[in-house]
Image: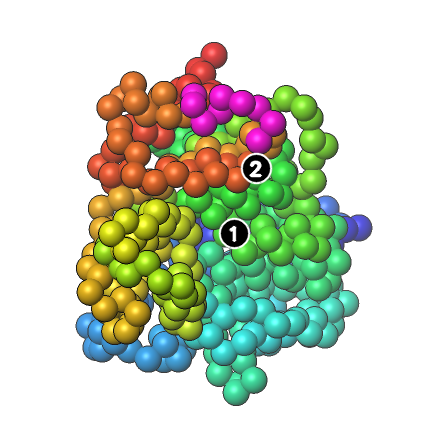
Amino acid sequence: MALIVQKFGGSSVANAERVMNVAKIVCDTYRDGNDVVVVVSAQGDTTDDLIAKAKEINPKAPKRELDQLLAAGEEISISLLAMAIETLGCPVISLLGWQAGFNTNSVYGSARIKNIKPNRLQAELAKHNIVVVAGFQGINRYDDVTTLGRGGSDTSAVAIASALKADKCQIFTDVDGVYTADPRKVEGTKKLKEITYDEMLELATLGAQVLNNRSVEMAKKYSIELEVLSSLNPIPGTIVKEVAKMEKMLIRGVTNDKDVALVSILGVQDNPGVAFKVFSKLSQKQINVDIILQSFGRNDTKDLVFSVSKENGPVAVELLNGLDILDGARIVCNTDVAKVSIVGAGMESHPGTATKMFEALYDRGINIKMISTSEIKISVIIDANEADRAVSAVHAAFIPND
């Protein structure tokens, strides 16, 4: 007997037919002699629909109240799935995040899990119940409902797997594994049999939407082996784990992230402390900064350019316009950009990787605005309308269609 945690995304439970399909998968796993905990997201576009409803009432709704609203999406899903499982003859109980023991901090809309008290989960499993848990949510020290941000159900599943020391954590989606690029947009993509935590973390952070980056980070920290597989196509998926490193460089994937804005601070005085004051101001408002480029000083001024999420671009400009140290500088935001990246182990020790990527873009006449590199990834910022062509070009260069 094994303890298995299964997570199903919104598309997997989008309608009654799919809810019943998920119930069958869960019951089959249970009847094979396993203990099962199921984590479920809100159905289909429910979260987006709830956000739209909130904006109709109050475009600047308090984040606490938004969390109260958005948590309802998962509550609907767990109830419906539990009803479906019951009709198939399996014992089941549904639990909200706080009932399952999720304690978080108080950052509404993007809360972090502080700990899980799995007593209720363990008690229900001891009764041989299938436990269906609302993903994406928890409770803070004020007894307020909190949500974990986009993709938070993945993180919920991995956290439960860690707390219960589960034997397996399966992430069911609408694709049957991790591919070298989005197979809906790029020809010749290949499904990966396995991938390392670090590679998957980079892909998730850089725009691949198969797994949430926080869930991969947690899985690596607690050595939780993940399997990404389809709820609609019963075939083996992709295993995310520590994989033995080889000398040969392997490009694992090409990603495209259009949730990007470039903020440029032009003509700022070349004085000490500019970068510190700019980025500390942004961090106070929980704005994450990705690629940073600073020019050499000229005529006692310099330019500072960095990327943030598209939503945070205008917010960053508004914050920085009030900063005294930037007096005389011009601050602009460009949201018509995208980030295209390649990810793979061993890049640093294989000369010519960047050249090959840049050549592929040059051959298609695609201009590069910014570049960022690490041991396992190279990212470039380009015009948003060139992103899909860029991904296809780079993918063909590194992963030819056999």
Q: Amino acid at mark 2?
A: Glu
Tell me residue 60's x, y (percent): 25, 76
Taking the view exactly as shown, the residue that stands out farthest to the right is: 1
Tell me residue 372's x, y (percent): 43, 41
Q: Which mark is residue 213?
A: 1
Q: Which mark is residue 375?
A: 2
Identified at 49% across, 21% down, the residue is 352
Q: Quick check: can you spot residue 19?
A: no
Identified at 68% across, 54% down, the residue is 221
Q: Which residues are magenta?
A: 348-356
Q: Earlier in the sequence, mark 2 or mark 1?
A: 1
Which residue is more in the foreground, 152 or 71?
A: 152
Judge the density around disc 2: few (<14), some (14-19), many (≥20) Cα neighbours within 10 Å: few
Q: Amino acid at mark 1?
A: Asn
Taking the view exactly as shown, the residue that stands out farthest to the bottom is: 142
Direction from residue 86 to residue 341 in the image, left or right: left
Tell me residue 35's x, y (percent): 72, 56
